[in-house]
Amino acid sequence: MKLQKQFVRDGETVAVSAEHVRDDRWRVRVGDRVYDVDALPVGEGGVRIVPVGDEYERSFVAHGAAAGTDYMVRAHGRTHTLSAPEGRRGGGAGGADGKVRAPMTGTVLDVLCKAGDTVAANQPIVVLSAMKMEHKLTAGVDGVVESISAQKGGTVDQGAVLAVVKPAQKEDS
């Protein structure tokens, strides 16, 4: 079995493929890099990724969740939003859309900004507790916070929009 997709990550289109080799072994290509890994299921939909043959790489647990037309992946303490390239999304803006979505059902630990605040693409906006982990969620775009629907202590569903950031206008050079 071989899976192939293209995603937009940090404004760049990246080709990703995963090919089942045998048992728990997979060959994964992300852009130009190839990884051989063992993918071991763990509770609550996570996968333990164990690099093969690289004594310097450590295993880690990853979780993934659909969020509207995007896909969110939580690994190494960060949540990454992957989007389909513009031609495959059925329209819409290129890159991140400024919507901060819950990667999974959880509890809001903190809201780190308010409507009207100017934020950077990688600046944490909402902190979510889910699956016994803390998730610092970002908008993925520089801009101004238009709205915050997340409330500290509140419970949110997977894919729920917690905040909306209006992307900053790019200056012409």
Image: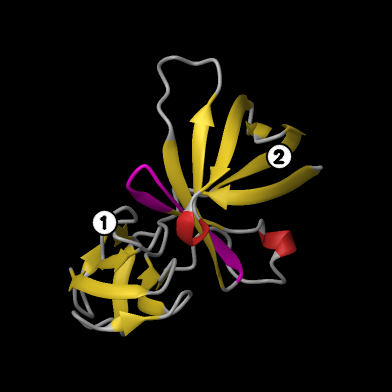
Q: Residues within 10 Å of mark 1 (few under 14, many from 20)?
A: some
Please tell me whether mark 2 or mark 1 is closer to you in this view.
2
The residues bearing labels 2 and 1 have C-alpha atoms spaced at a distance of 29 Å
Give the magenta range: 69-79
Which residue in the protein does label 2 denote? 17
The majority secondary structure of the magenta stretch comes to: strand
User: In the picture provided, is 104 more to the left or to the right than 17?
Assistant: left
Residue 72 visible in rendering: no
Q: Residue 84 in the image: x percent, y percent? A: 65, 58
Instruction: Say if 25 sits above or below 93 in the image.
Output: above
Instruction: Say if 72 sits above or below 108 in the image.
Output: above
Residue ID at (35%, 49%)? 78
Residue ID at (58%, 61%)? 94
Q: Which mark is residue 123?
A: 1
Residue type at mark 2 is Ser
Q: Residue 142 in the image: x percent, y percent? A: 34, 59
Q: Check contact, mark 2 vs mark 1: CB within 8 A.
A: no
Secondary structure under the numbered disc 2 in the rendered image: strand
Residue 99 is drawn in which quadrant? bottom left
Q: Residue 101 in the image: x percent, y percent? A: 42, 71
Q: Residue 105 in the image: x percent, y percent? A: 40, 74
